[in-house]
Amino acid sequence: MPIVVDIDVMLAKRKMSVGELAERVGITPANLAVLKNGRAKAVRFSTLGALCDVLECQPGDLLRWEAGEAEEGGEAAGR
């Protein structure tokens, strides 16, 4: 996937656990893990906003695009 999620980087910078972040954002630790590990298909702006609020960062600190990372046979291949 060309979108890379860097939540773990911000968690380390803020010395915060996944469980604490999930609780403060209002999502389950399982859903946060899906997002953190890059397996999410989408993220709501409200969730992204809550993550940025709690981690005191910008969306670009959590998400970045990397060219050439697309999966073979993925949705992007058909476009």
Image (tube, grey):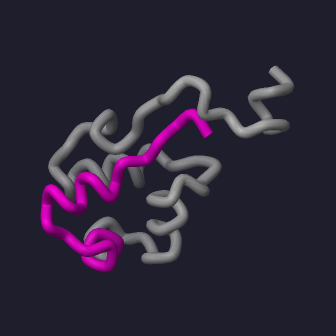
User: In this figure, what is the number of numbered marks?
Assistant: 0
Please report the residue visible at 72 percent of the width from the left and 39 percent of the height from the top: 71
Quadrant of the rendered image containing residue 64:
top left
Q: Where is residue 42 in the image (x, y as percent from the top left)?
A: 59, 47
Q: In this view, does 17 lie to the left or right of 68?
A: left
Q: Quadrant of the N terminus?
A: top right
In the image, residue 24 lies at what x, y percent?
26, 71
Which residue range is magenta in the image?
A: 1-22
Q: Is residue 29 above or below residue 41?
A: below
Relative to 23, residue 40 above or below: above
Residue 27 lies in what quarter of the image? bottom left
Residue 78: give x, y in percent of width and height: 85, 25
Q: Is residue 34 left or right of residue 57?
A: right
Residue found 48% across the figure and 68% down from its top = 33
Residue 48 on the magenta span = no
| Rendered position, 55 above or below 73 | below
Residue placed at 41% from the left, 54% from the top?
A: 47
x then y, percent, for residue 73: 84, 37
Q: In this view, does 71 lie above or below 42?
A: above
Looking at the rendering, in which quadrant would you find the C terminus? top right
Question: Which residue appears farthest toward the top when viewing the image?
Answer: 79
Is residue 2 within the magenta segment? yes
39 left or right of 9 in image: right
